[in-house]
Image: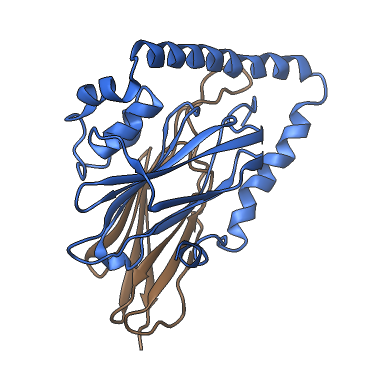
Amino acid sequence: MRIRTLIDVPPKARAGEVITIRATISHPMETGYRRDSDGILLARDIIRTFSCQFGDKAFFRSDLFPALSANPYLAFHYRARVSGELTFIWSGDRGFEHRERVALIVE
Amino acid sequence: MNADQDCGLTGSAGSAGSACPAGKRAHLPEAAQGPRRALVGALLVWPMRSWAVRALALGGLMSSAASGFATTASATAGSTKPGSTTATRADSPAASYNEAILRFTGGTRPRSGKVKLDVAVLIDNGNTVPVSVSVDHPMTDDDHVEAIAIFSERNPQHEVLRVDLSPDNGRAGVASRIRLATSQKLMAVARLSDGSCWSHEMEVIVTLAACIEGEP
């Protein structure tokens, strides 16, 4: 299944402005606490970590637990100083790993 | 200040937000119909039974640890270092709500204040509950919020979300969408660079619980 992400970064930021970044990824976030129609526990399949970095420097890291809703959504802040590239990294169970890159334009 | 901090975070990220709850909601009534009704009924009882057992166990644990926080503190203080490797956090859930909080704070009970947990008091659908946390504290190199975590009193796992922040964030806050298994307390805790911990606890009522649908 193709992984879809939705990342919202303001198109332009002023130097020193605190921007809000929002990121969502398509993922079932199967909790590991539910049972199928035969009463068998469904194996956990979640995204465990998400981080966002500017250039090589991670400024936001998070641990996700089964209580995060499917298609996990996170919003957080960043103080924009110079233009560059934001990298979004999700990783989780069953070797899940996904990266997205978004340009940040500061004027 | 708090209201100002919230405003950027409480909105959802466009259409992706509605994708999940719609799918789940559509599924529920279907499961309750037809010849599978008895089976589904039986399945619904299953998680509820284990919940009851869990609740009893939790109750016993809390009462045996008479002054809850004080006793568990010594047991958990050194067990989890802040900033240690993240990969296994989801794999070692805390045994109780209090233990989960103390693991995060490093053994001290958080003081209430500074933190604002924003969540609806009355929740229709426990599968996607918008929450946001903001901390009224500067984000400078010397003095900033290091981490924020959300804990749930009565979900199967008490940890919900944990974020590590840095001065580059500019403002301390995070928003997300979470699952709630039942009516319960929620606590947001912030750990500052000086080591102090602050919290905000809320009690919420959940009408449709997450986790108890029988089938995926």
- Say which of B31 and B115 sits in front: B115
The answer to which quarter of the image holds residue B112 is: top left
Tell me which residue sits at (55%, 14%) in the image: B52
Residue B146 coordinates in the image, percent (x, y) = 26, 53
Give the left or right position of residue A65, taking residue B78 as reference. Answer: right
Residue displayed at 50% across by 29% down: B155
x and y percent of residue B3 in the render?
51, 63
In the rendered view of the protein, which quadrant contains the N terminus of chain B? bottom left
Side (left or right) of A70 relative to B150: right
Q: Colour of chain A?
A: brown
* In this view, B181 is above or below A29: above
Of residues B136 and B127, the one nearer the viewer is: B136
In the image, residue B129 sits, relative to residue B72, either above or below, namely below
Q: Residue at x 21, y 45 (%)?
A: B83
Residue B162, visible in the rendered structure: no
Image colour for chain B is blue
Residue A61 visible within the image:
yes
When the figure is inspected, residue B155 is found, relative to residue B170, above or below; the finding is above
| Residue A36 drawn above or below residue B87 | above
Please provide percent x and percent y for residue A57.
22, 65
Residue B215 position by quadrant:
top right
Q: How many tags in the picture?
A: 0
With B148 as the anchor, is A40 left or right in this view? right
Q: Nearer the viewer, residue A77 or A1?
A: A77
Q: Where is residue A30 shown, x and y percent of the image?
A: 50, 35
- Looking at the image, residue B64 sits to the left or right of residue A68; the answer is left
Residue at left offset 51%, top offset 21%: A41
Task: Give the residue at the far bottom of this rendering.
Answer: A107
